[in-house]
Image (cartoon, rainbow, N blue to C red):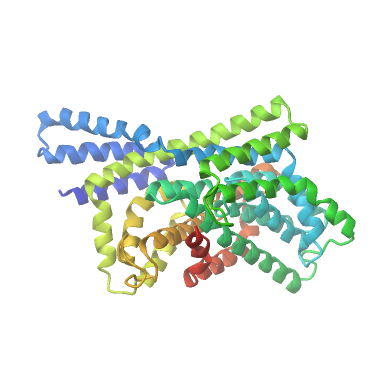
Amino acid sequence: MTTIDIGLWVTGGLLVLVILGMRVGFAAAFAGLVGLIWVFWSKKGYAPEEFGWALTVAVKTAGQVPHGKVASQALSLIPTFILIGYLAYYAGLTKALFEMAKRWIAWVPGGLAVATVFATAGFAAVSGASVATAAVFARIAIPEMLQVGYDKRFAAGVVAAGGTLASLIPPSAILVIYAIIVEQDVGKLLLAGFIPGVVSALIYAALIIGLALTIKGFGPPVTGFTWRQRFASLPPALPIFAVVIIIIFFVYNPFGGDAWGTPTEGGAVGAFIVFLMAMWRGMRWPELKDALIETAKLSVMIFTIIWGVLIYVRFLGFADLPGAFSDWITGLNQPPMLTLVFILLAYAVLGMFMDAIGMLLLTLPVVFPAVMALNGGEMVSAADSAFGMNGTMCAIWFGILVVKMAEFCLITPPIGLNCFVVAGVRPDISVQDVFKGVTPFFIADAITIATLVAFPAIVLWLPSLA
């Protein structure tokens, strides 16, 4: 049995464990360790007396992964981004942001739902967690939408879909994870997510307005706000914009010259500003403790998944499965763009059964090298590439595409996490109702992904300036 065969058998076993309900991080670590033992033992011809040696080497190899790979400055972005979101909630910035969006936008057809989309997009700019965004606005936006006559299923669907925008709009924890796995520049990836995130929010808003114009009584506009009231809503939401500007300047200085610092430093400064604002608005020790504990819980969960999956990735390297998959992909007798579309469709199906972070961590070690090979390799020039971009730009473009697919998976049944979060916050709305409410947004996400595939410049313009 070759190492490729071992890789396929272990990967199949990993998928079985995940389907049976084992946590992705633990399943990946177990599969990776078993795979390492198997590969090393096979090199000794499966001699019984050599099993102890194979076990020792496999354990030492796996044991080096958690510290060796996770002791990375880029990963320190994750807890700071998550902390910003929780502190913003306790500072009342989310409610201020929603109120501002309502006063300025709610006059359009379906206005309150459109305001919810843009408010979630604004909150996504200070929170790297989609789940936190969905949970916060389920408490704030759904009651107001129900009060003016929205169907409860659609109101829940708007919040669940709007929460996914945090995956793309920087600061995004999942973009940081992608950058770590594929060893790309975190700052450029964060920049690349900004315009696609805005485009996605605009397409959501256009969908809502279209439904409101075609379905009678779907979502009545909310009017009656004076210009004085609108301008009065701006100051309470200004800290959100301040944090966004700080993070952008720490990633890329749009006025020329060097950036102010690293993305990690930008996240820390942003968290400190929101912390001061939260204290000024009355946050005390119980609220601060809750924010810190929730940040720690979510960060530990993400880091545990990364640790486990990196052990599995180490095994894949010894089994040479990524290289074999790349050779197979590049050997297909069909246009590279068609192959890329099939890969994205495979992500859509896989996302129905796995959470977004686990799905990307498990697949990227195999799929990313294949896509890069499909384009012509990591060192290819734009002129010689299949997709019309050099290796670095292709890595950024593909990253935004798969993260958008991860957004899509956050609302697809049967395990769309955002839908479960909204239903958990609103016991009066069942999970089935939330899944029905997000159905129209599948169309919007499909349009967004098709737009990003057809027009890569939407993704690559900002990173090209950095």
Q: Residue at x 60, y 62 (%)?
A: 200
What is the quadrant of residue 424 in the picture? Answer: top right
Q: Is residue 238 left or right of residue 9?
A: right
The one of 305 and 68 positioned closer to us in this rendering: 68
Please identify the residue farthest to the top as the structure is shown.
Answer: 285
**Can I make out residue 210 in this image?**
yes
Q: Residue at x 68, y 44 (%)?
A: 136
Q: Looking at the image, how many numbered discs can be counted on the residues? A: 0
What is the quadrant of residue 34 in the picture? Answer: top left
Q: Is residue 187 left or right of residue 362?
A: right
Residue 10 lies, in percent from the top left, at 28, 45
Q: Is residue 78 above or below residue 379?
A: above
Residue 168 lies, in percent from the top left, at 55, 55
The one of 452 and 276 positioned closer to us in this rendering: 276
Q: Is residue 237 left or right of residue 39?
A: right
Q: Residue at x 65, y 44 (%)?
A: 135
Residue 380 lies, in percent from the top left, at 31, 65
Q: Is residue 117 above or below residue 357?
A: below
**Can I make out residue 140 in this image?**
no
Residue 302 lies, in percent from the top left, at 48, 39
